[in-house]
Image (cartoon, grey):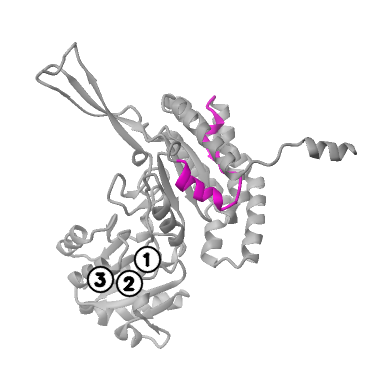
Amino acid sequence: MSQETSAAAAAPPPATVPQIMRAMGAAAVAAAQTLALAPTAQKDRALRAAAAALRAQSPALLAANDWDLREARARGLSMALLDRLRLDERRIEATAAGLEEIARLADPIGTLLAEWLRPNGLRIQRVRVPLGVIGIIYESRPNVTADAGGLCLKSGNAVILRGGSEGARSSAAIHACLEQGLKSAGLPATCIQWVPTTDRAAVGYMLADMADCIDVIVPRGGKSLIARVQAEARVPVIGHLEGICHVYVDRDADPEMARSIVLNAKLRRTGVCGAAETLLVDRAAADSQLAPLVRALLDAGCEVRGDDVSQRTDSRVKPATEADWHTEYLDAIIAVRVVEGVDAAIAHIGRYGSQHTDSIVTQNAATAEHFLARVDSAIVLHNASTQFADGGEFGMGAEIGISTDKFHARGPVGVEQLTSYKYVVRGGGQIRP
């Protein structure tokens, strides 16, 4: 028998997906116990060191991302998904700066939320604590590896990251920088783990077989991924199904402001969940506002699918169908409808929206307050682009995603949203009669 044959026979068989995931789960639980007690300065050192590693490893990150992009193009991924996947020097710098911004945030762990003294002498405190171990399942965007890892680290949570196969090399390269930061700060590398297999069985195992290890799952990706997570997970889920975001241009809107906001909300980045998918225009403003807005969108390369009134403004407008009002395009396509005032806009958003992000453009303060109070979305804006639906823009440093849930977290999920609390009760020998 040759030496090569002998070595192959002696080598252990490759680990199965359950074995990989069980080992990661056990390591995460142990790391979470350490991280929950880690001082702020140590966590911040890890974040800054990871940011420095990202900058230093920029050529390697770009090379890994180029490989991912070539394979993604060969697989026929859409332009929107390719945009989500793409890294460049600017995005790497923004990712590194995001980690440094997280380091500058106040540490939520140990924060005293409330305190009171009972008549029997018991002193009760409500104190912020980590959730424990967080599982994050995401697609396309490799920067989520850094954002999610950094937010979990700052909030004292261990995390298991399962990125999409389309960005596997990019995510692995970013994760290596996070590991470098952890090690340099003297924290276990297992505080932030990245699932090393693209086997889809790993997702199923995280959802159904790790309830003893994972305290909450956060999905970030397309509608089918998030629907699957919400259907199969045996642990709590923080997520949103989709971002069908609206801009409503009111009769009292400033025309130049409306044009600027609508173009930015739709076209700044069409593949983000805060991109506007439907434009609603007050019928009282249709004569002055509708045609210029539609023309500006079309001239900027956006396909417009409109109702009858909108179609009459420009021959390039395609007829909108009922399905268009329900659609998150994540592309340079927008649906346009004329509505009978602010209440009709609110009704449309209530029927077709996804409770993500909706904006009103108006100079009428009373109309704006009416809209802001009655639109039941995670984020509502007045005279601002829906593309501000972002944790970084909210001063959170970064975000894991935008939650449309109403329990635990809603809107951008940042450091504070990745915590819970416990009650600490101090007494002097009291017993209950």
Mark number, residue 105: none
Q: Nearer the viewer, mark 2 or mark 3?
A: 3
Q: Secondary structure at mark 3?
A: helix
Sequence-earlier tag: 3 or 1: 1
Quarter of the image for residue 306 reads bottom left
Q: How far apart are the alpha carbons under marks 3 and 1?
A: 14 Å
Q: Amino acid at mark 1?
A: Ala
Mark number, residue 279: 2
Mark number, residue 348: 3
Taking the spot 34% from the left edge, 78% from the top edge, the residue there is: 322
Q: Classify residue 288 as left or right of residue 294.
A: left
Q: In terms of depth relative to the viewer, which is nearer, 39 or 88?
A: 39
Q: How far apart are the alpha carbons under marks 2 and 1?
A: 7 Å
**Quadrant of the rendering where the N terminus is positioned:** top right
Badge 2 local density, few (<14 within 10 Å), some, or many (20+)? many
Magenta segment boundaries in residue numbering: 186-210
Q: Secondary structure at mark 1?
A: strand
List the residue tagged with mark 1. 276
Q: In terms of depth relative to the viewer, which is nearer, 231 or 170?
A: 231
Estimate the x, y position of residue 145 in percent, counting from the top left: 52, 45
Image height check: is 362 above or below 33? below
Badge 3 local density, few (<14 within 10 Å), some, or many (20+)? some
Estimate the x, y position of residue 20 in percent, counting from the top left: 59, 40
Q: Secondary structure at mark 2?
A: strand
Estimate the x, y position of residue 35 in percent, counting from the top left: 45, 28
Q: Amino acid at mark 3?
A: His
